Image: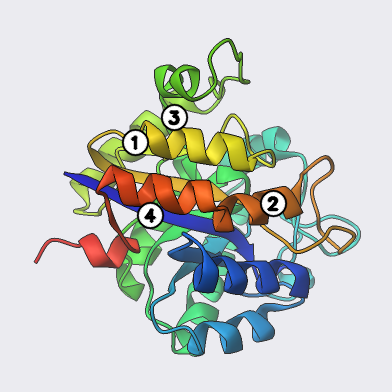
Amino acid sequence: MKRLVVTADDFGLSREVNEAVEQAHREGILTATSLMVSAPAAADAVARAKRLPRLRVGLHLVLVEAWPTLPPAQLPDLVDARGLMRRDMGRLGFDLAAKPAARRQLAAEITAQFEAYRATGLPLDHVNAHKHFHVHPLIAGAVLAIGSRFGMRAIRVPREPRALLRLAEPGARPRPALDIAPWAGLLAARARQAGLLIPDRTLGLAWSGAMTPARVAALLRHLPDGLTELYTHPATAGGFAGEAPGYVYAAERDALIAAEALEAVARSGAASGGFSDFFPT
């Protein structure tokens, strides 16, 4: 059986992102989105989500490159001089391993983000993290332990089959995600042990920020059996704070509302929804 979750990350980052999420859900194939609880447009995102009862919303944990939920003064090992979560993921990962204080700050910040999400009143469909930083073993352990206290039942595991990408775009050589592959495998094993729902595959890794209409439709035409998450970064326009350089945000929005995508989902016969629509009963 084919099951499909089409997700937009960075909900709450800007009004442009929020507008695209709403449009792609109302007019297109988008079924789920992941909320940055402390981003500049988070309140607008929550208000929109409450007007869209079929849109499944999860928590997009911010542990790198964006706004923390706790005051920066409480996170001296995790933030930079601007008060944002650090960008140097490699060094930050080392500091988490070497410094007990950094791990305590990490746990406090993850807890604060779960608490902020619970305060929205939105059901928690799933959990993932900005830049997939939740695959780091120490971060994964904290997310699994803390998330269990807040009703977390599904988590993204960023693994993407290369063969499927080659089917979708013959001759393409998309950038491999080999740097996170071993950690993603470990996360999958730990998540299953914790009884969490995980996707069999996550599409959008190699072409992150470049999920064009042609690519999305082609991936959907080759949709395998099992639970697939296809994740995107739509916005109505660029030029907002926190945008990623080189991302074609409007093209990703267009991909989610394109007639080709709608047709491909229909022809696939896949059941569509959020992760919570596929929880075991």
| N-term-proximal mark, 1 vs 4 | 4
Say which of marks 2 and 3 sits in front.
Answer: 3
The three-letter code of the residue at mark 1 reads Leu
| N-term-proximal mark, 4 vs 2 | 4
**CA distance separating discs 4 and 2:** 25 Å
278 w.r.t. 191: above or below: below
Tell me, for residue 32, which label it has, or none: none
Label 3: which residue? 160
Local SS, label 1: loop
Say which of marks 1 and 4 sits in front.
Answer: 1
Say which of marks 4 and 2 sits in front.
Answer: 4
Label 4: which residue? 5
Visible in this render: residue 281?
yes
| Within-10-Å neighbours for mark 1: few <14, some 14–19, many 20+ | many
Label 1: which residue? 223
**CA distance separating discs 2 and 3:** 22 Å
Local SS, label 3: loop
The three-letter code of the residue at mark 3 reads Glu
> Residue 23 at what x, y percent from top left?
61, 71
